Amino acid sequence: MAKLATIFLNNFFLKSFTIKKLGLIILLFSISFNIFSQTDSTKNVNQKDITDILLRVSKHLDFTETTSDSIKIKQSHFSLLPVIAYSIQTGIVGGITGNLAFVNHKDLNANVSNIMATLAYSTQQQTIAILQPNIWTNKNRFNITGNVIYLKYPQETYGLGSNTTFNDDNHIDYSFFKINLALLKQILPDFFTGIGYAIDNHWNISETGTTNGRISDFEKYGLNKQTTSSGVTINFLFDNRRSSINPQKGLYGNVVYRPNFTVFGSDQNWQSLLIDFRKYFRFPSNTNNILAFWSYNWLTLSGKPPYLDLPSTGWDAFGNTGRGYMQGRFIGLNMIDLETEYRFGILRNGLLGGVVFANAQSYSNWPQNNFNTINPGYGCGIRIKVNKQSNTNAAIDYAFGTRGSQGLFLNLCEIF
């Protein structure tokens, strides 16, 4: 699920993209607060964020030199990012997203807890409300993670597999509520395991049919007015990153097995496996530039999940897979997604940075369930420091896919 307008701004075509329109359709500004009970000495100096710039412009104040390499002990840092945007899929969107970053104890190796929240509405009558906690307890003994989502979400779907075209467009509508929460316990340094619960409930599901007049894959696969998928989750996590907001180094590995059984309230029995790995390097090693890799694999082990619960572009937990394609562009029983990104500084004070990235995704066709096409994407973007204390960036990316697919993607925090 998108942290911000990844779910809003896909498929905005370059031929209609001008500097004038950019000024009309996008308004980005930020508010950052630091609420603290105790401060710590700093490592880096001369770091700047949007708050510094706004203060200097509006009040003609000198910059106060502070650090941002790590969050100050016993501090909370709140970042807020309102957005006004436009895309073909959503029309005009007004929304607001924020994150609260904090540490729960004085340990210098403490992981940074983070709570993300997004609320938005579009002229296409789409309502989006998302809450995503990632909380670490004292000495990183426990990790509470997951998401709570409500959507009223008319959207386009194009059928199953990786070979679908825009001619397969099928407008659908539904309401959606999701809870996915897990409690993990540390059993070895940086290694956690635990259980959780997940439920995905779709209702008021409808379709208008494909624009080419063919029977939609949605109808062939099984179109129901309401679906429920419910089950426990078994989680294995390795995470030696100190912060998930803007990782500077380390390894993240998350494996989630989810059996959805009727005994838990699911409409039918099916099982899935999520494998999510991320690795970060400083490159060159004497700089703050980051080379990052992401492997996201979402597999159906058995059974037949409801159509809207199948793996799909941009429907990972933060809505970030497959930049270059609109959300829901590809869908299948199994998904493989590989991404890489190079993040580099532009200004020495950290206010502005840049990225270049590439990705490739493939979805199994149906009913054969074979992988036969790879859909690549690539692009570049900028990063604007929203909060130097929590190292939170606003991400603005433009990405290209195949068959003319391209779009603008916005995020609060890094893509992965």
Image (tube, rainbow, N blue to C red):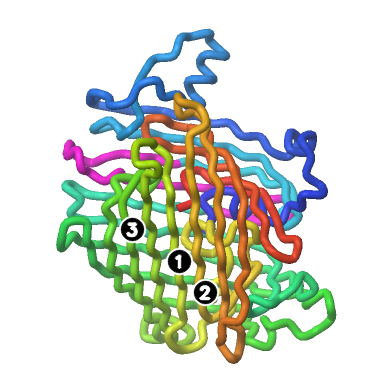
| Label 1 – label 2 distance at C-alpha | 8 Å
Q: Residue 78: x and y, percent?
A: 41, 34
Residue at x-position 44% and y-position 14%: 63
Q: Residues within 10 Å of mark 2 (few under 14, many from 20)?
A: many
Q: Secondary structure at mark 2?
A: strand
Answer whether labels 1 and 2 touch (C-beta < 8 Å): yes
Question: What amino acid does circle 1 point to?
Answer: Tyr
Q: How many marks?
A: 3
Q: Is residue 198 above or below residue 250?
A: below
Q: Would you identify the image quadrant in which residue 234 lies?
A: bottom left
Q: Secondary structure at mark 1?
A: strand
**On the image, numbered disc 1 is attached to which residue?**
296
| Label 3 – label 2 distance at C-alpha | 19 Å
Q: Residues within 10 Å of mark 1 (few under 14, many from 20)?
A: some
Q: Residue 218: x and y, percent?
A: 67, 81
Q: Residue 283: x and y, percent?
A: 40, 44
Question: What amino acid does circle 2 point to?
Answer: Met
**On the image, numbered disc 3 is attached to which residue?**
252
Q: Residue 349: x and y, percent?
A: 45, 24
**On the image, numbered disc 2 is attached to which residue?**
335
What span is colored magenta in the figure? 99-128
Q: Is residue 363 above or below residue 181?
A: below
Q: Point out the tag, 1 or 3, that comes first from the N-terminus.
A: 3
Q: Is residue 77 magenta?
A: no
Q: Point out the tag, 3 or 2, that comes first from the N-terminus.
A: 3
- Of residues 177 and 364, the one nearer the viewer is 364
Q: Is residue 326 above or below residue 345?
A: below
Q: Is residue 62 above or below residue 313?
A: above
